[in-house]
């Protein structure tokens, strides 16, 4: 994935519109970084290391305010030495930037809840961070109603209408990107085409229950265990491009509906692979 984000960033830098397979946020950020610092693998690594530093800082302020200074410091040490986070800090992947943006959103929520002097500013910052998180990793959209509910409870009844501010930022930002996609492709795409395929890769009869991402990054074409996976993928890819995303979603949804227990197991496994540094 990191290599694909890097190539998309180079396309943006050249003024080209990349194929809308990956979410645009990270590659757009890298394209801007390349304009300032130059392109290349070392520059790409430096651009992601910035997010590792930002994660430690955002965690510190949020944890210090909500928990304690000691927990904030121990968390910073963990961020600095945890192997999975070190890996994400040197490869252009979306996890670290999204983590930073969600921590800053949480920090903004704490300021809103405490009725700081600039509540409107903090709400606007939250809306911007959530929009950027969705642009980098569209699954972050699930956090929007969570933060909306928290802010609604945290604001005084007379100020709850201020919740429209971050909502407006999200609506304008997401709507603008969807309009650009429509203009460039002449068809409806929800953020990017890769989302539907990734959902299917993680939820089909051949997906490993533990390493659910395996078939998305390894070639098992010669392994008879996974022949059905490649046959179904070939069948979907044979469809017109505008029908493929919906076909991936239908296949994944059907499997989830038929095997809800396996879906829960795989979801838990995705958390476990991070915690065991796999």
Image: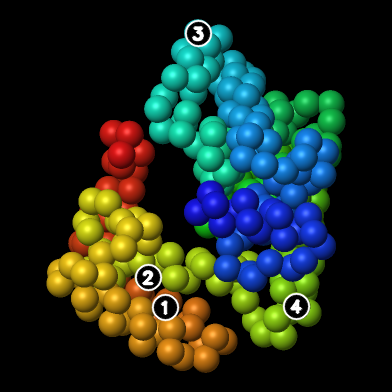
The Cα atoms of the two marked residues, 3 and 1, are separated by 46 Å
Cβ atoms under marks 2 and 4 closer than 8 Å: no
Q: Which residue is mark 2?
A: 200
SS assignment at label 4: helix
Residue at position x 54%, y 45% from top? 93
Name the disc covering residue 248, or none: 1
Cβ atoms under marks 3 and 1 closer than 8 Å: no
The Cα atoms of the two marked residues, 3 and 4, are separated by 50 Å
Cβ atoms under marks 2 and 3 closer than 8 Å: no
Residue at position x 71%, y 55% from top? 10
Classify 10 Å Cα crowding around label 4: few (below 14), some (14-19), many (20 and above). few
Observer able to see residue 160:
no
Mark 3 or mark 2, which is nearer the start of the sequence?
3
The Cα atoms of the two marked residues, 2 and 1, are separated by 6 Å
- Image: 236 above or below 192: below
Q: Which residue is mark 3?
A: 70
The Cα atoms of the two marked residues, 2 and 4, are separated by 25 Å
Residue at position x 55%, y 9% from top? 69
Name the disc covering residue 184, or none: 4
Name of the residue lying farthest toward the top: 70
């Amino acid at each position: 994935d990191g290599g694909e984000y890097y190539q998309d960033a180079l396309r943006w830098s050249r003024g080209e519109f990349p194929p809308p397979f990956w979410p645009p946020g990270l590659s757009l950020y890298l394209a801007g970084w390349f304009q300032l610092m130059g392109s290349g693998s070392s520059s790409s690594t430096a651009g992601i290391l910035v997010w590792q530093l930002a994660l430690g800082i955002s965690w510190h302020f949020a944890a210090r305010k909500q928990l304690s200074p000691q927990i904030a410091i121990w968390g910073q040490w963990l961020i600095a030495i945890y192997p999975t986070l070190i890996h994400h800090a040197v490869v252009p992947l979306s996890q670290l930037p999204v983590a930073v943006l969600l921590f800053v959103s949480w920090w903004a929520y704490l300021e809103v809840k405490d009725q700081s002097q600039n509540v409107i500013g903090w709400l606007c910052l939250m809306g911007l961070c959530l929009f950027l998180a969705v642009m980098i990793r569209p699954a972050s959209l699930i956090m929007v109603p969570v933060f909306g509910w928290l802010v609604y409870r945290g604001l005084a009844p007379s100020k709850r209408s201020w919740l429209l501010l971050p909502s407006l930022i999200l609506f304008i930002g997401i709507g603008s990107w969807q309009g650009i996609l429509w203009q460039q492709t002449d068809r409806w795409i929800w953020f990017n085409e890769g989302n539907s395929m990734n959902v299917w890769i993680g939820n089909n009869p051949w997906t490993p229950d533990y390493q659910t991402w395996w078939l998305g990054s390894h070639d098992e074409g010669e392994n008879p265990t996974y022949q059905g996976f490649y046959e179904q993928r070939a069948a979907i890819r044979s469809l017109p491009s505008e029908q493929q995303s919906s076909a991936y979603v239908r296949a994944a949804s059907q499997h989830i509906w038929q095997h809800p227990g396996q879906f829960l197991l795989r979801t838990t496994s995705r958390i476990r692979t991070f915690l065991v540094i796999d």
